[in-house]
Image (tube, rainbow, N blue to C red):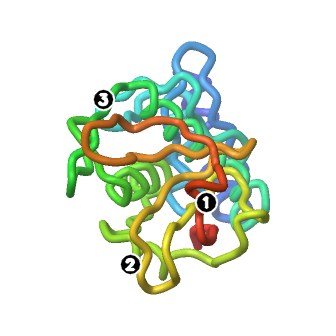
Amino acid sequence: MKLTHSLLMLTAVTALFGTTVTTASAATRSEIQALPHQSATRAAHDAVEGSSSTAGIQTDDVHADTVINGGQTAQTSRSKAVVNLAKKLASMNIPYVWGGESLHGMDCSGLTDYVYAHVADIHLGHYTVTQESKVTTKPVSKAKPGDLLFWGSAGATHHVAIYIGNHQFVAAPQPGQNVDVETISSSFMPSFAGTVK
């Protein structure tokens, strides 16, 4: 209890002076942690208490490491958390459901919106073209883990997935399949990638 109080006080004092550094790794149980745009006090509390959750998902491998407001470390941390939650969902046998955005079923844009909403409180919308407007586009060859991959021409995309690195992505592919990890191939090549703003 004394450690919790000390951490909360330290975070509150640091937040008053501008730069907040929060380490969100609980030794016993890590779950998705608050990110830099959220309350620093809440992040510190969750790190100590391990009390936040993502729709009932226990995510030992999903956590925000070191977060510095507005810095590259925050982006890297968010990307890691996005990738970890996407991989977790790919292991849960979640079926493709058109218009779905829950653990009971997801479509491609439902998956990407779900992950970003739960990890970073960013709502991408439930339509690939809407999600295009929420990213800074780049060639697929420049994609970084946590970026979105789009299929189709800009303004008329028809599929989206989360790039997880090593030429792989997590997607809700089509009816009859589950959310899974797939490999980029020339037969189903994404048209472009985008980093969520």
For the point 24% across and 41% down, which residue is it? 105
For the point 30% across and 52% down, which residue is it? 107
Q: Tell me where residue 95 sits by quadrant.
A: top left
Of badges 3 and 2, the one in the foreground is 2
Q: Estimate the x, y position of residue 167 in percent, counting from the top left.
A: 71, 46
For the point 59% across and 63% down, which residue is it? 190
For the point 40% across and 78% down, which residue is it? 129
- What's under tag 1, amino acid-wise? Met
Q: Estimate the x, y position of residue 114 in percent, counting from the top left.
A: 36, 51
Of badges 3 and 1, the one in the foreground is 1
Sequence-wise first label, 3 or 2: 3
Q: CA distance from mark 1 to mark 2?
A: 21 Å
Q: Tell me where residue 3 sits by quadrant.
A: top right
> Can residue 140 be seen in the rendering of this structure?
yes
Q: Quadrant of the C terminus?
A: bottom right
Q: Is residue 125 left or right of residue 16?
A: left
- What's under tag 2, amino acid-wise? Thr
- What's under tag 3, amino acid-wise? Gly
Q: Estimate the x, y position of residue 71 in percent, counting from the top left.
A: 77, 64
Residue 96 lies, with reference to residue 71, above or below; the image says above
In the image as oriented, which residue stretches furthest toward the bottom?
Answer: 155
The residue at which mark 2 appears reads as 130
Circle on res. 189: 1
Q: Nearer the viewer, residue 151 or 31?
A: 151
Sequence-wise first label, 1 or 2: 2
Where disc 3 sits, the SS reads loop
Sequence-wise first label, 3 or 1: 3
Circle on res. 56: 3
Residue 37 lies, with reference to residue 118, above or below; the image says below
> Can residue 9 be seen in the rendering of this structure?
no
Q: Nearer the viewer, residue 72 or 47?
A: 72
Where disc 1 sits, the SS reads loop
